[in-house]
Amino acid sequence: MDRPLCRCSVCQREFQVRFRYQLREEAGRFEYFCSQRCLAAGLEVDEEHACEVCGQTFVLEYPYQVIASDATRRYFCTPVCRERAPTLRREAMRQVAPQRPLRRIAVFNHKGGTGKTTTSVNLAAGLAEGGARVLLIDADGQGNVGASLGISGEKNLYHVLVHGLPAEEAVVPVRPGLDVLTSNESLAAAELHLAGLPNRARVLRERLSSRVEGYDVVVLDCAPALSLMNQNALVYADSLLVPVACDYLSLVGVRQVLRTVKNVRELLHHDVQLAGVVPTFFDVRNRISRDALETLQKHFGERCFPPVRVNTRLREAPSAKQTIFEYAPESHGAEDYRTLVDRLRALSVEEPPLRVAS
């Protein structure tokens, strides 16, 4: 089937897009260029700019010398400087913290309303406060991580998955030691793109495996669904943290999570393991909460972490665009998530994640 005709943004000629350089997204809209000459004309050729890497002033002559983002343009005098730019952030991060084995934790449950985003945000923030370099990835198209912290990246997980954008060019630094790779509704389109690729469950792993450097921990906030995006998250992760609301239906949902982990191991050949379960919305006054906690403790033993109690401050913190440690550091919610952070930090080679039985 023929491609649709597009109109060149410079000469207005209609043409079919056949090469990558002919399409560029900038300031929330698309621009089209029928030829290299029109592309050069659209990039303000012959104007002087300062190279972002070496600082040298030069006259813009070639398309490769500029990278356009939603808000700014970045200029490079030579191909060497352009190639060096993506490594600058990684080099700085290496100087801040020595390389340690990277831990990749997926916060996942098929059931909604179990506190996945709250757990992801506060776990990542707590680890960062403890001195770790943390990358928090929002793998849910609802974009609740960005909403909780009051951020919206110019580029997001969609651009990393679909366009192959290096992750370090899309992350947003939000706190000391904590960076976020945001998402929005475009992630649904990314999932359609993934469906047509070979090894479609391993794209996230391939995109990030060699491009996420300088971090100690990656935390992935997963959507409440059995989706291709979640398959990618689980294949990338090495361990799984499961928030479980203290009610009957959530207990039933845990069985489905364990089946999913088993399928990832057997069908996708990735040995993701269970770091533990986190009982959430625990209310000691309710019998169902006490019974749910007892059931989880009986089944998972020490890998059933101490519960996160029902806490109004936890619900209020996202409206203030803060973590619980910033919004109410003395609250029960902050205390419970500090305990969770301490327990996860204590997991080591001597105490590996729990292997899910086949």
Image: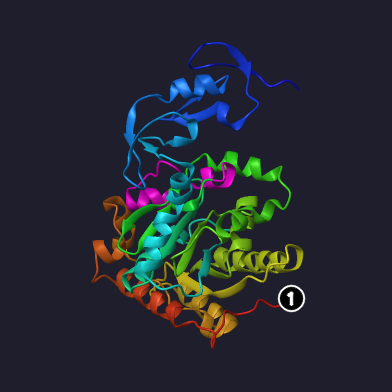
Q: Nearer the viewer, residue 215 or 270?
A: 215
Identify which residue is drawn at 65% across, 51% down: 228
Q: Tag 1, which secondary structure? A: loop
Colour scheme in use: rainbow
Question: Can residue 13 be seen in the rendering of this structure?
Answer: yes
- Front one among 188 and 316: 188
From the viewer's perspective, tell me whether residue 60 is left or right of residue 31: left
Task: Report the side of 196 relative to 338 (left or right).
Answer: right
The residue sitting at 43% across, 46% down in the picture is 81
- Farthest bottom residue? 350
Q: Which stretch is magenta?
A: 143-164
Quarter placement of the C terminus? bottom right
Q: What's under tag 1, amino acid-wise? A: Ser
Residue 103 % position (x, y)? 51, 71
Is 117 above or below relative to 186?
A: below
Q: Tell me if residue 31 comes above or below residue 102 in the rendering.
A: above
Residues packed near mark 1 inside 10 Å, few (<14), some (14 to 19) or many (20 plus) = few
Quarter assignment of residue 205: bottom right
Q: Is residue 339 above or below residue 117?
A: below
Q: Which residue is mark 1?
A: 358
Q: How many marks?
A: 1
Q: Give the camera-side residue of 72 and 199.
A: 72
273 within the magenta span: no
Could you tell me if residue 242 is visible in this image? Answer: no
Could you say where residue 147 lies in the image, as x and y percent from the top left?
A: 37, 48
Q: For this view, does 40 lie left or right of residue 130? A: right
Q: Position of residue 182 (x, y in %)?
A: 44, 49
- Asked if 327 appears above or below 272 in the picture, the reply is above
The N terminus lies in which quarter of the figure?
Answer: top right
Residue found 73% across the figure and 20% down from its top:
2
